């Protein structure tokens, strides 16, 4: 069901002025290939499309990563990728600490308006997934 919703959304995403769609697809692929990762997809057209990843080993948190496609301008969507502050590092200082900003806990969020920086965020996704797998 979730993958059908995501598939329909991706099929309907035909204009991608910022080149973000392939980045989102690569993150989706990474998360679907990780063992123990469960996904949820929340659609709010005109606001955001939110991919939320949770590891089955997590006991107290409902996710380890939230990949939001910001839909305020459907022709130039961008990503906001957030993690719990204690689950990732930010060696290049590219993210923003958001106190209480991720489901009431401190979050570390990264905005991606084009494909530059995609590899850096992919490394953060890997890091958060590894952290979440430890429970």
Image: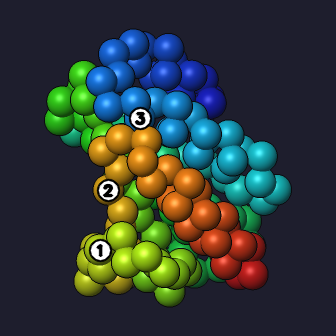
Task: Choose top left, top right, bottom left or bottom right for residue 48.
Answer: top left
First in sequence, mark 2 or 3: give its number. 3
Q: Give the labeled residue for mark 3.
A: 20
User: Do residues under tags 2 and 3 come within 8 Å of each other at their CB atoms?
Assistant: no
First in sequence, mark 3 or 1: give its number. 3
- Above or below, 90 against 114 in this view is below
First in sequence, mark 2 or 1: give its number. 1
Whole-percent x, y for residue 124 in the image = 56, 67
Q: Is residue 53 left or right of residue 117?
A: right
- Above or below, 75 against 55 in this view is above
> Could you say whether the residue bearing mark 3 is in a helix, strand or loop?
loop
Q: Give the labeled residue for mark 1.
A: 96
Q: Residues within 10 Å of mark 3 (few under 14, many from 20)?
A: many
User: Do residues under tags 3 and 1 come within 8 Å of each other at their CB atoms?
Assistant: no
Task: Choose top left, top right, bottom left or bottom right for residue 82.
Answer: bottom left
Q: Give the labeled residue for mark 2.
A: 111
> Could you say whether the residue bearing mark 1 is in a helix, strand or loop?
strand
User: Do residues under tags 2 and 1 come within 8 Å of each other at their CB atoms?
Assistant: yes
| Colour logic | rainbow
Q: Residues within 10 Å of mark 2 (few under 14, many from 20)?
A: some
Whole-percent x, y for residue 102 in the image = 35, 71
């Amino acid at each position: 069901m979730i993958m059908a919703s995501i598939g329909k959304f991706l099929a309907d995403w035909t204009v991608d002025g910022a080149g973000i769609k392939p980045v989102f697809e690569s993150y989706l692929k990474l998360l679907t290939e990780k063992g123990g990762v469960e996904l949820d997809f929340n659609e709010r057209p005109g606001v955001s499309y939110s991919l939320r990843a949770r590891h089955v080993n997590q006991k107290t948190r409902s996710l380890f990563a939230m990949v939001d496609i910001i839909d305020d301008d459907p022709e130039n969507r961008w990503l906001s990728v957030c993690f719990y502050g204690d689950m990732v590092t930010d060696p290049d200082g590219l993210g923003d600490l958001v106190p209480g900003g991720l489901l009431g806990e401190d979050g570390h969020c990264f905005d991606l308006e084009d494909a530059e920086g995609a590899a850096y965020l992919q490394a953060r996704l890997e890091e958060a997934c590894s952290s979440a797998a430890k429970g």
